[in-house]
Image (tube, coloured by chain):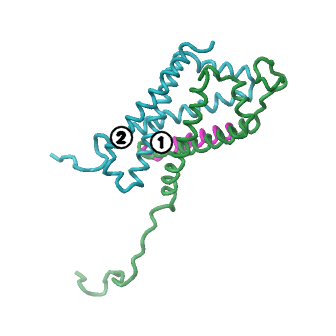
Chain colours: A cyan, B green
Amino acid sequence: MPTAPAGTLYRGREGMWSWVAHRVTGVLIFFFLLVHVLDTALVRVSPEAYNAAIGTYQTPIMGLGEAGLVAAIVFHAFNGIRILLVDFWAKGPKYQKVMLWVVVGLFVVTMAGFLPRHLINVFTGGH
Amino acid sequence: MAHGTAAVAKVDSPRSPYVRRKTTRGNYELYSWVFMRASGVVLLVLIFGHLFVNLMVGDGVHAIDFGFVAGKWSNPMWQVWDLLMLWLAMIHGTNGVRTIINDYATRDLTRGILKGLLLLAFTVVVVLGTLVIFTFDPCPPDAPAELLASFCTA
């Protein structure tokens, strides 16, 4: 029975799962970006067309989607900095696991600052 | 058996210099690796600023309408901000998806089709977005005044 090689930097656990999460969030953000440029391009059609499109972003369901999008961006951004440190800081590979938990901590703090304000805007604000 | 007679296989002289076969197409992947890291840092600043101004300040997402965009793009700072964000994010994202296609699409034809679609999406979105930023009119003459920014009627 072959056994899995032990002690590789990125096999299983924090290293691999952060890599998976980085890919998944990256793809999500990319497809949103394609849609977001197209909806913004409606400003060249007419104010009415743009306002109608952006109005659909102001519904509660889309508001929750925006919360998820921001969560994906915040994780991708902080984990990206962790990747930079793993690649360029001499002690980066040694501390890559600790740095993932720092990323998770910063993610929680940032979302705690963003979510209440955004959700209040979505569920009580405007129209 | 023609052992040791006229038919001796020609063997390279052991002293002939080793010639490395070229197996790469230049340093493209190295530059792409560097670009992902450099653009990532810039995008962190650009996108966090974008999200803060559009979702956190004032009424957040509810404040966004045509007049809001007009107010931002009448300022060259936001035009440059959004243009840089568009280009860097599209190149960064396209290059990331290219890596993922290379990893998971094993058939040449599948990989070619997916990367062709990716290049098409990249070109359409970047050209469209760039044109929109540069040709945007914050006060279109035929639009109802109540939909426009206050500086259009002032």
Q: Residue furthest bottom?
A: B5
Question: What residue is shown with label 2?
Answer: A100
Residue closest to the eye, A45 or B69 = B69
Amino acid at pointer 2: Leu
Residue closest to the eye, A42 or A82 = A82
Q: Dot 2: few (<14), some (14–19), or many (≥20) neighbours within 10 Å?
A: some
Find residue A103 and report its image quarter: top left
Measured from the top left, where is residue A115 in percent x and y? 48, 24
Let me know if marks 2 and 1 both belong to one chain: no
**SS for callout 1:** helix
Quarter of the image containing the N terminus of chain A?
A: top left
**Are discs 2 and 1 less than 8 Å apart at CB?**
no
**SS for callout 2:** helix
Q: Is residue B31 magenta?
A: no
Residue at 74%, 29% (x, y): give it: A44
Q: Is residue B2 left or right of residue B113?
A: left
Chain letter of the residue beneath label 1 in the structure image: B
Any mark on residue B110, and which?
1
Q: Is residue B103 left or right of residue A11?
A: right
Residue closest to the eye, A120 or A51 = A120
Measured from the top left, where is residue B118 in percent x and y? 55, 41
Number of residue marks? 2
Q: Is residue B152 left or right of residue A116?
A: right
Residue at 65%, 38% (x, y): give it: B82
Measured from the top left, where is residue B84 in percent x and y? 63, 43
Q: Magenta residues? A: B105-129
Quarter of the image containing the C terminus of chain A?
A: top right
Q: Residue furthest left?
A: A1
Amino acid at pointer 1: Thr
Chain letter of the residue beneath label 2 in the structure image: A
Where is B113 relative to B22, above or below?
above
Any mark on residue B97, and which?
none
